[in-house]
Image: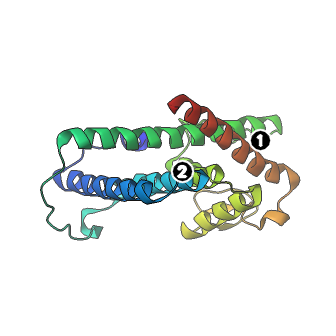
Amino acid sequence: MHEQFRSYSLNEDQSARTKTIARAFDRLLTKVEEVAPNGRELSIARTNLETACFYAKKAILAARPMDLPVLEEQGDPAPIVIDVIRDRHIAEAEKDLIACARAAHEANRAYCIAIGDNSQPSWDNAPPWQRDSALMGVPGALNGNTPEQSHESWLEEKRRTGWKYGPTKNPETKEHPCFVPYDDLPPEQRAKDHLFITTVRAVGAALAARHG
């Protein structure tokens, strides 16, 4: 489970919902692998499915009980051994996403320090919104986004969460000076998008080689 939620104790309803998502993920991934040929596109499909499963579980953990839809009765659960194998696969994918995001965040922090910006906290001290923002950019980077596409994806995520342009970054008022089109960014800010893409892909490739 995502490290931000290690302190959560799942109640019965949350456990049932996360298991439902995991089983649905398992069935869909199995079907995709049955009908789609091996290659880059299949790898992208796996990554996006894993990301969808990751954030669906996170949404359940973060939601108020009153906001959750009614959960329909489920049939007989899958054998425990299948649950364990599937959960291990999902957990590995989640750890890899977090590793890529952490590395990109720390690379960006080192770059910021080098250009005189000491405002960036370490990954472990970063607020949840900042870590989430990095995590949201990882699948696109792994799937071939350009730096410009990565920035546009970041902009869309910021729009969805209520951010707007401001001359200085202010999490309280949700203002950010980079809330502009990619072409309007100063060179040192565009460099951050290049750095993010390069770091995520390097770490992703290293982890993929480790998994064989």
| Residue 207, percent from left and from top | 56, 33
Secondary structure under the numbered disc 2 in the rendered image:
loop
Whole-angstrom CA distance, mark 1 to mark 2, is 44 Å
Q: Amino acid at mark 2?
A: Asn
For the N terminus, the quadrant is: top left
Secondary structure under the numbered disc 1 in the rendered image:
loop
Residue 75 relative to residue 23: left or right: left
| Residue 41, percent from left and from top | 58, 56
From this viewpoint, is residue 165 visible?
yes
Pick out the residue farthest to the right: 187
Name which of mark 1 and mark 2 comes first in the sequence.
2
Residue 209 relative to residue 25: left or right: right
The dot on residue 117 is: 1
The dot on residue 38 is: 2
Residue 4, located in which quarter of the rendered image? Answer: top left
Residue at 53 percent across and 32 percent down: it is 212
Q: Amino acid at mark 1?
A: Asp
Q: Nearer the viewer, residue 113 or 13?
A: 13
